[in-house]
């Protein structure tokens, strides 16, 4: 058990470090471009969704993007009405990480990492150093996943662990609760879904318990935004609350069709369980956005009703 925990911790640590390098490198590289995307966005809600998706794909963190958005609302740079479609786009953008992980690019990452280190250390130009950081971060994400996979692989031989995960498949509500609690602690749904994909790669978890846990993670990611809004004003709190309501509504909408979601995800990628989880993650968020986009005013009204002052 000590070997499992230490190996998995090393892999998870490198994964998080890789995300940090990748995020910071991209952030510096395109900072002047993306910081004004939200503020200057006054157009159609579909463009707002696209902007939320794009920025979250760059930052590789829905929590970070939501916190930035809440700050803009607090500073009166955006209204609550303008923020809601962006929140929907943020949910879609966070699925990009899981889709990238499903490509299983670990064998190439050991080439990219030294290249990134050399560029970062030898370049005096800031943009070139950022490119080095992006390469380092990208490679460390997949090196971390490789180590996490090797570290967790002995779990497939532990019967008790298999029984617990199997119970999540038989009782989806337990899986949803588990996912919510896990991401509330990890403060990153991308990390949580990456761990799920790793467990799937070693044959420890099947698609049904994985998807129920993933749905819980999707709600758990709202905790960071809610906490960050607590010391702020009314509009900021309402924005965080809309994010929470939207994710809960998506969960309620999809829950009766859990088996159908799993089936569609499997049919799209029959031989790749990691991709199946990524597919379910993407389908869930895209479907929720399409269904609830016409009802953004309802979410706003509920948030304004709950938080009046």
Image: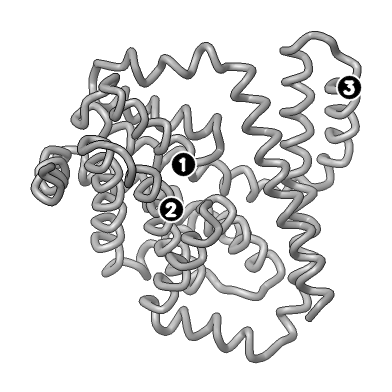
Disc 2 or 1, which lies upstream in sequence? 1
Question: Which residue is depicted at the point 75% across and 28% down?
Answer: 133
* Quadrant in the rendering for residue 73: top left
Q: Position of residue 234 (x, y in %)?
A: 20, 38
Q: Position of residue 211 (x, y in %)?
A: 46, 65
How many angstroms separate mark 3 from mark 2 (CA)? 35 Å
Of residues 132 and 201, the one nearer the viewer is 132
Question: Which residue is depicted at the point 34% across and 34% down?
Answer: 70
How many angstroms separate mark 2 from mark 1 (CA)? 8 Å
Of residues 80 and 287, the one nearer the viewer is 80
Label 1: element kind: helix
Left or right: 275, with 19 as reference point: left
Q: Which circle, 3 or 1, is nearer the viewer?
A: 3
Question: Which residue is depicted at the point 40% across and 50% down?
Answer: 283
Residue under numbered circle 2: 221
What is the number of the mark on residue 121?
Answer: 3
């Amino acid at each position: 058990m000590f070997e499992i925990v230490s190996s998995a911790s090393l892999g998870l640590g490198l994964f998080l470090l890789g995300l940090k390098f990748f995020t910071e490198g991209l952030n510096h590289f395109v900072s002047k471009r993306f910081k004004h995307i939200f503020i200057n966005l006054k157009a159609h809600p579909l463009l707002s969704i696209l902007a939320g998706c794009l920025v979250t794909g760059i930052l590789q963190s829905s929590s970070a993007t939501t916190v930035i958005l809440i700050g803009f609302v607090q500073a009166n740079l955006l209204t609550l009405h303008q923020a809601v479609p962006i929140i929907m786009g943020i949910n879609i953008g966070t699925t990009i990480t899981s889709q990238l992980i499903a490509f299983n690019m670990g064998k190439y990452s050991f080439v990219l990492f030294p290249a990134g280190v050399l560029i970062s250390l030898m370049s005096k130009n800031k943009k070139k150093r950022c490119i080095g950081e992006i390469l380092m971060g990208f490679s460390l994400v997949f090196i971390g996943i490789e180590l996490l996979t090797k570290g967790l692989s002995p779990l497939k031989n532990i019967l008790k662990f298999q029984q617990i995960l199997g119970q999540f498949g038989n009782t989806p509500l337990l899986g949803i609760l588990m996912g919510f609690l896990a991401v509330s602690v990890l403060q990153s749904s991308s990390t949580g879904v990456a761990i799920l994909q790793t467990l799937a790669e070693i044959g420890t978890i099947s698609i049904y318990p994985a998807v129920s846990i993933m749905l819980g993670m999707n709600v758990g990611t709202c905790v960071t935004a809610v906490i960050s809004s607590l010391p702020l004003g009314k509009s900021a709190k309402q924005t965080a609350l809309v994010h929470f309501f939207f994710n809960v509504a998506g969960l309620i909408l999809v829950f009766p069709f859990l088996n159908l979601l799993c089936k569609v995800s499997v049919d799209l990628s029959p031989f790749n369980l990691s991709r199946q989880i990524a597919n379910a993650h993407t389908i869930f968020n895209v479907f929720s956005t399409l269904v609830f986009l016409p009802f953004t005013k309802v979410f706003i009204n509920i948030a304004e009703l709950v938080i009046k002052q």
